[in-house]
Image (spheres, grey):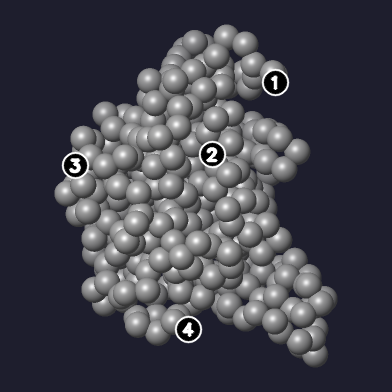
Amino acid sequence: MSELFTATDLSTPPLSAMASTTKEVLTDLSPLIKVYTDGTVERLLGSPHVPPSPEDPTTGVSSKDTTISPTLSARLYLPKLTHATQKLPILVYYHGGGFCIESAFSFFDYRYMNLLSTESRALVVSVDYRLAPEHPLPAAYEDSWDALKWVCSHALDQTHFEKDQWITNHADFNRLFIGGDSAGGNIAHNVALRAGSESLPGNVKILGAILSHPYFWGSIPVGNEPKEEQHLVYRLWLFVYPSAPGGIDSPLINPLADGAPSLSGLGCSKIIVCLAEKDVLTARGLVYAEEVKKSGWKGKVELVEIEGEDHCFHLFDPQTEKAKNLIKRLASFISH
C-alpha cells in the first residue's frame, strides 16, 4: 500500500488522548483517524503545531499568524528582502492531510513553507482551512476560496478590514500562485477551476497552480489503482464529504468524471503537476495532466515525476537530494 499517510515519530497526540479502547468505534480510517460513537475524534497521524518565528534560523524567513475571519486563519512567510519595498510573487498554499488532519501551523508545513519561501523568494500564505469530520466538505473548499479572496482584496484601494502589511507592501499581484500537496493539491485544482468562472477581488488573475501529489480518485480504476471500494483513499472521500453529489465520482474528487466541468476552464496561465513513482495517486495524476493538455486549455502544463519516491516524500524528509531538487523545480516555476 502507498505510504499515503506515513507514520512518523513526530505524530501529534490524539485530540482525545483519553480515548479508551473500550469505546465503540463508529468509523475507523487507521492509520489516519478514528471516530467513536460518542462523537470523540481521534487523529492518529499528524505533526505537532509549532509557533511562527521572527526569523527562522535555517532560512532567515520570517513568519507570523493572522486571522482572516472568526473561523479562518493563516500563517504568512516572508523571505529576506533585498530592499524595504521589494515586491515578491505570492503563493497561497493549501496543506495536505486528507481534509481531516494536519494544519497550516503544523511542523511539516512550517518546515516546508520556510524552505519553499526562501528558495522561490515568494511571500507565502498558508491557509488553515477547517477540517472534517467536525466540518465536512465543502467547508475546506469555501475556506480556501475565501482565503484567496482575502489575499486578492489587498490589491484594492479600500477594504472593510485592516490590511496585512506584508501583503500590502510586498505582494506582486501580477505573480499570484496557488498550490498544495495531496488534499491541498485537490483544493488548488478546484480553486483554479472556480477562478475560471468567478472573478477575484481587484480582478486579480492566478498566474500558476502547483498540484503536488493531488488527491484525485474515482469509481473506475486508472492504471494500477486498487479496485476495492474499501481502500483507504476511496473510503476517506466518503468520510470527509458524505453528502458529495456523485459520491466518489463527484467532480471535486474526480475531475475526469462524466459531467465534470471542462478542464479548459482552469483559471490560471500555467500548472505544474508533481508526482511520485510509488504513490497510489500517481496513475490518476498522470491522466489528469494529459487531460488538461487535451482539453483546449490555453495554458502551459508541466509534469514532474520523481522515481523511487512515495506520497509527499518532500514533506516528510525535505533534506534528501530528490526533495531539494523538487523544491528547486517549484521555485523555478514560481520565479519564471
The residue labelled by disc 2 is 145
Q: Are marks 2 and 3 in contact (CB under 8 Å)?
A: no
For marks 4 and 3 on the same chain, the one whose residue lies earlier in the sequence: 4
Q: Quadrant of the C terminus?
A: top left
For marks 2 and 4 on the same chain, the one whose residue lies earlier in the sequence: 2
Counting from the top left corner in percent of width and height, residue 145 is at: 54, 39
The residue labelled by disc 4 is 230
For marks 2 and 3 on the same chain, the one whose residue lies earlier in the sequence: 2
Question: Looking at the image, how many numbered discs can be counted on the residues?
Answer: 4
Q: Disc 2 residue type?
A: Trp
For marks 1 and 3 on the same chain, the one whose residue lies earlier in the sequence: 1
Q: Are marks 4 and 1 in contact (CB under 8 Å)?
A: no
Residue 66, placed above or below residue 45: above
The residue labelled by disc 1 is 161
Residue at horizontal 30%, vertical 75%?
221
Q: Which mark is residue 218?
A: none
Q: Secondary structure at mark 1?
A: loop
